Image: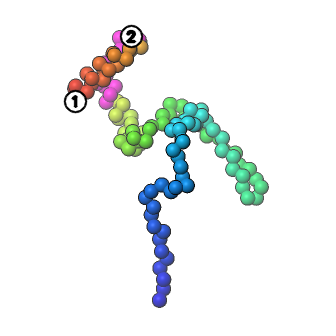
């Protein structure tokens, strides 16, 4: 009789040894966007250095936003819709906090 290999049980909870309670979200985000280097030390004694830098215009989405926009095409389509409904700025000025709140309310009222 052949025995079938058992699959390990899927653990849904975080293990006790993984304590991220003192972690800071986005701690290395700015450095990552500026570019970073990864050094790989191989068993044979050689070293491989890889340089990573985000492409010009690349944007990193937060996890909650990423759920709704799985790829660049969906992000671009949504932004094009916003551009089409946004009023054209007469001149470039910075808005005050109350002006921003009013603008958000007026867009929400259209829905």
Tell me the quarter of the picture where residue 30 sits.
top right
Left or right relative to 69: residue 102: left
Total number of numbered labels? 2
Left or right relative to 68: residue 33: right
Residue interval drawn in magenta:
81-93
- Secondary structure of the residue carrying tag 2 is loop
47 magenta-colored = no
87 magenta-colored = yes
> Where does label 1 land, which residue?
111
Which residue is more in the foreground, 53 or 65? Answer: 65
Relative to 1, does residue 40 appear above or below in the rendering?
above
Which residue is more in the foreground, 91 or 103? Answer: 103
Q: Position of residue 52 (x, y in %)?
A: 61, 40
Q: Position of residue 8 (x, y in %)?
A: 48, 68
> Where does label 2 land, which residue?
91
**In this view, which residue lies farthest toward the bottom?**
1
Q: Earlier in the sequence, mark 1 or mark 2?
A: 2
Q: Position of residue 78 (x, y in %)?
A: 34, 34
- Secondary structure of the residue carrying tag 1 is loop
């Amino acid at each position: 009789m052949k025995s079938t290999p058992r699959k390990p049980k899927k653990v849904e909870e975080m293990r006790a040894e993984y304590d991220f309670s003192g972690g800071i979200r986005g701690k290395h985000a700015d450095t990552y966007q500026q570019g970073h280097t990864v050094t790989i030390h191989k068993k044979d004694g050689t070293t491989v250095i890889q340089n990573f830098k985000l492409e010009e215009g690349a944007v990193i989405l937060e996890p909650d936003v990423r759920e709704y926009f799985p790829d660049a095409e969906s992000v671009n389509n949504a932004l094009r819709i916003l551009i089409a409904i946004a009023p054209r700025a007469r001149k470039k000025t910075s808005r005050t906090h109350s002006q921003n709140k009013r603008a958000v309310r007026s867009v929400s009222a259209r829905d």
